[in-house]
Amino acid sequence: MTATAVHDRTAVARPVSVPRGYRFELVKVVSQWRIRLLVLACWIAPALFVVGVSQQSTLPSDTLFGRWMLATGWAAPLVMLGFAGTWALPLLTSLVAGDVFASEDRLGTWRHLLVAVRSPRRIFVAKALASLTVILLLVAGLACSSTVGGLVTVGNQPLVGLDGHLLAPSDAAWNVLLAWLCVLAPTLALAAIGLLGSVALGRSPMGLLLPALVALAMQLAQMLPLPVAVRLALPGYAFISWNGLFTTPAQTGPLLIGIAVSLVWAVLATVLAHLLFLRRDFTNLTYDGSGRRAITAGALPLAGLLAVTIAVVTVATPSTGSGIRQDEVQRSVATAFAHLYRLQTEQLHRPAVTEAQLRATAACNKGAGRLAAEGPGNDWRCVVSWHLPGVQTTGQAIYQLDFTADGRFVADGDGPKEVNGYFLVRTPVGDAPNPLWQFDGNVDLLDTTPKG
Amino acid sequence: MGTLHAVRARGITKSFGDVVALDGIDLDVTQGQIHGLVGPNGAGKTTLLGLLLGLAVADSGDLEILGAPVGRALAAPDGVTGFVDGPGLYPSLTARQNLAALAALRGEDGQTTDIDDVLAEVGLTDVADDRTRGFSLGMRQRLGLAAALLTGPRLLVLDEPANGLDPAGKKHVHDVLNRLAEQGTAVVLSSHRMDDLEALCSEVTILATGRVVFSGPLGKLATENRELDYRLSTSDPDAARRVATDTAGIQVIDDARTRTDGDVLVVRALVPALDELVVQLVHAGVALRELTPVVSPLEAAFLALTEQQEAGR
């Protein structure tokens, strides 16, 4: 439109402020029964789950920290975190962020909203902030509910870390908090992908499901024997890498890379959603997203980001291959064994022994030595050796290891039965779980050991 | 002093890809006027309303709203409100909550009394605390109007505001719009219902294929019209037919509609010829029981003008 020469001013269109738009969006979101039910579920269900587990004789030992759920209340929020990263958070972000724009398409309220707010840019910001608030509320519910449930039901005891060392309750609390904060980064990335799908695909169910589908694809990718650089370049890796907080020293490399990658994805996906939103035609009531635009302005830039991230991580980190190497496996198993042996010694009221005195080592191979000792698989076998003060004989124990591609392993005791053959050990105060029977661990996928 | 224009558009064009929605539109709406937009589907009414509400930006032309040219941002100027393609309501909120949320959004207190007042004005007091999920189309339209009233608009833009309204609801809406106009608010509304436009509007603009084919007072539209069809009911249909056939400028229409009712004759004529027919019928001793247009003058003009435009494409 040409500007008329006689006028030196344009009609004043004072947009609604972002805080007011934000409150308006919150009112709308919270008025939905689906969201109310989600909030209620996230704040109640985890505690009920913990209470339920505490009444069972079997534990969710296939979930990280699940085997410690009856030993300390701090295991519960970590079990919940593992579940949330796999299922709950992708679904929650789908239902909230993936629907925040699409709901206006369904209701046919875009024009009304634009007339009322008078700024597409501020509508976008208000909607993004409102969905972020609800997602944070849901995440907080999962964390608080499971923590309170665990502490009330089981108690405030020390937590056994992923390398077997004992974390004092205060340290466990701090690490649990950090772990939940860390998964906010990939949650934000999924939320941003949800915003992008919601803007780009309108009422299409694909828009609503996009974060869940992306999360599922990333989980499948993490199960594949991909190179470490690819694994770390995926925005969902921080859903896994918080595990590194529970080793000594903490495996901060993969964790920080995972968080950084997630945040970059969150920023880029949000910017793309914003640009797409500003370009949409609000006069077309039948507008239902544009598949072509979703690909060119949404999927392609994110694919480009993935390629760039893989390249950067490859250059920045020295690790190649799967990252699961024999020396690292042997070190992890020996360290965990030493810590847990000391724990077992205390349980059995035997003479105290330290990790240094034990001088535990592990000799591990894969496929009975026929395969290269590298990469994931359930055919790892380790022989752990240790020494007791004043005893000439070297103790030995066998473990079968099941390694997943993300560097996590479960070590299953294979004798001798006095050390790791039984699920329970007989202590002076009754039977207790045998910490050496089966234990979880993980290896740092980034090669930090100097070569040569 | 010139008339204060709420809307002044000159040469507005707007295309969506290859489709030309508006092609050189001129429009003048003064303060306190209720201005009707009418046209067949696809004529460009909604696009034009969208421009007034800041939902789209014209490709070219000059558009002034409330005395100032509009910018290129997607935003309705202050004092402008309304709705196109139905009011935007949130079904999980009650009628009162919808209005309160909107008032809070605009930084107004959203006083309970204000909300109660506008709800009463559109006749929705009884359902104020019901969720709008169960509202009928007519109730939604009235609540949309209430939302607009809450802002005290100087230009109100409405798309088919009488859709789905029962007679009582329509009366509420008409009363509200007339009162707003009396207070100086300009109202631009589109409708397919000629009776609504005739009852409400002082001026209309007829659009066809994105162009203005008429714009001005309703009276002028009626006089610009050529011939109209009239239903003629008399005491002696046969005699009336003979008189009509013999009267200059009168054409008796025989079609399926007239044959269904033997006492009614349909004639096509200009108003002067029609006057002469009445005189001749009286002279012939035929009593006149009914003489009414088959379609309203506005509708006839609308059909004639839009058909001409379509034929000229």
Image (cartoon, coloured by chain):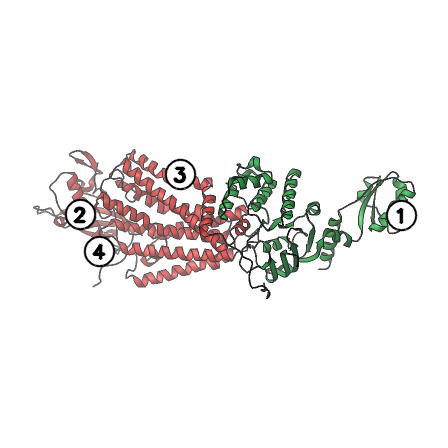
On screen, residue A92 versus residue B288, left or right, reads left
Instruction: Tell me what residue is drawn at x 39 percent, y 39 percent.
Output: A41
Q: CA distance from mark 2 to mark 3?
A: 43 Å
Q: Secondary structure at mark 2?
A: helix
Residue matched to label 2? A338
Which chain does the residue under circle 2 lie in? A
Can residue A24 be seen at all in this image of the molecule? yes
Q: From the image, which quarter does the C terminus of chain A lie in?
A: bottom left
On screen, residue A432 versus residue A283, left or right, reads left
Q: Are marks 3 and 4 in contact (CB under 8 Å)?
A: no
Front label number (4 vs 1): 1
- The first of marks 2 and 3 along the sequence is 3
Q: CA distance from mark 4 to mark 1?
A: 113 Å
| Residue A283: percent from left, percent from top | 57, 54
Mark 1: few/some/many CA within 10 Å (<14, 14-19, 20+): some
Q: Are marks 2 and 3 in contact (CB under 8 Å)?
A: no
Residue matched to label 1? B245
In this rendering, the count of numbered labels is 4
On screen, residue B124 versus residue B301, left or right, reads left
Residue matched to label 4? A327
Q: Residue furthest right?
A: B284
Chain letter, colour green in render: B
Q: CA distance from mark 4 to mark 2?
A: 17 Å
Relative to the observer, which residue lies in front, A33 or A67? A33
Residue matched to label 3? A40
- The first of marks 3 and 4 along the sequence is 3
- What kind of residue is marked 4? Asp
